[in-house]
């Protein structure tokens, strides 16, 4: 597994690199956002680890530039910023996961492996199901001509359902993809977010696109309901 670590804290980055190398990974280092973006463009990585606050170019801007250029390598933000809206911004700019410093090294390794298993899946310009449209790069959702205001988690749940429209997606798959494989909270959180989506995506428009498949999971109607 090849990992790119972009962090201006040199001692921390060196320590993380040594630890990941001990786990059998190949790790390239960059200490500012500009160099990090160049490496992400020039070389193939399984996962990119991005600090947020860096000289030259923030991690948010690096991730946003990667996504705009069609580089879909999974991105895990490593940051001392632990605010809720900081995490939202990281996910909204195209990040896949978020880990606050100081972090547990075994948890870091587990999250890297989880992201690598998912892979850098190419994301189409726009996902469509009938008149329901989701733009993964712009992080926007429309039902017909009306733009819908969704939180980062709501959008991530809907994105997975739309990528697999017409198929059953299990609760476990939603938890692994949207929250992470080491999620230890209440699994019923999936039902909460599906309920929120229905109130925003379906009910105001008299639709029933998001379906519950008993004892199996959820399915988004291929025609958008």
Image: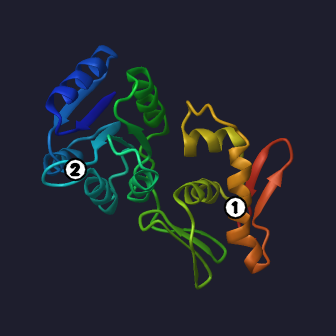
For residue 54, the mark is none
- Judged from the image, the secondary structure of the residue bearing numbered disc 2 is helix
Residue lying farthest to the top in this orientation: 22
Percent position of residue 64, x then y: 32, 59
* Number of callouts: 2
- Which circle's residue, 2 or 1, is located before the other in the chain? 2
Measured as percent of width and height from the top left, residue 11 is found at 16, 26
Find the residue positioned furthest to the right: 214
Nearer the camera: disc 2 or disc 1: 1
For the N terminus, the quadrant is top left
164 horizontally vs 103: left or right: right
The single residue placed furthest to the front in the displayed view is 83
Name the element at disc 1. Answer: helix
**What is the number of the mark on residue 196?**
1
Residue at the location (71% across, 42% down)?
171
Residue 194 appears in the rendering: yes
Q: In this view, does 72 lie above or below 172?
A: below
- Residue at 77%, 46% (x, y): give it: 217
Position of 187 relative to 166 (above/below): above
Q: In which quarter of the image is residue 210?
A: bottom right
* Labelled disc at residue 41: 2
């Amino acid at each position: 597994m090849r990992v790119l670590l972009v962090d201006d804290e040199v001692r921390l980055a060196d320590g993380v690199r040594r630890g990941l190398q001990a786990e059998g990974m190949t790790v390239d280092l960059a200490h500012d956002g500009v160099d990090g973006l160049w490496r992400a463009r020039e070389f193939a990585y399984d996962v990119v680890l991005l600090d947020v606050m860096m000289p030259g170019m923030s991690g948010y801007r690096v991730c946003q530039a990667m996504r705009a250029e069609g580089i879909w390598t999974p991105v895990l933000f490593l940051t001392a910023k632990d605010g809720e809206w900081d995490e939202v911004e990281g996910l909204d700019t195209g990040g896949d996961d978020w880990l606050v410093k100081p972090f547990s090294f075994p948890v870091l390794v587990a999250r890297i492996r989880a992201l690598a298993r998912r892979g850098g899946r190419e994301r189409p310009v726009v996902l469509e199901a009938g008149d329901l449209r989701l733009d993964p790069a712009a992080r926007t959702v429309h039902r017909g001509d009306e733009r819908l205001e969704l939180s980062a988690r709501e959008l991530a749940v809907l994105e997975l359902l739309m990528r697999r429209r017409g198929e059953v997606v299990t609760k476990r798959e939603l938890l692994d993809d949207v929250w992470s494989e080491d999620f230890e909270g209440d699994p019923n959180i999936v039902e909460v977010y599906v309920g929120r989506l229905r109130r925003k995506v379906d009910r105001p428009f008299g639709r029933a696109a998001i379906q519950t498949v008993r004892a199996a999971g959820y399915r988004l109607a291929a025609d958008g309901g």
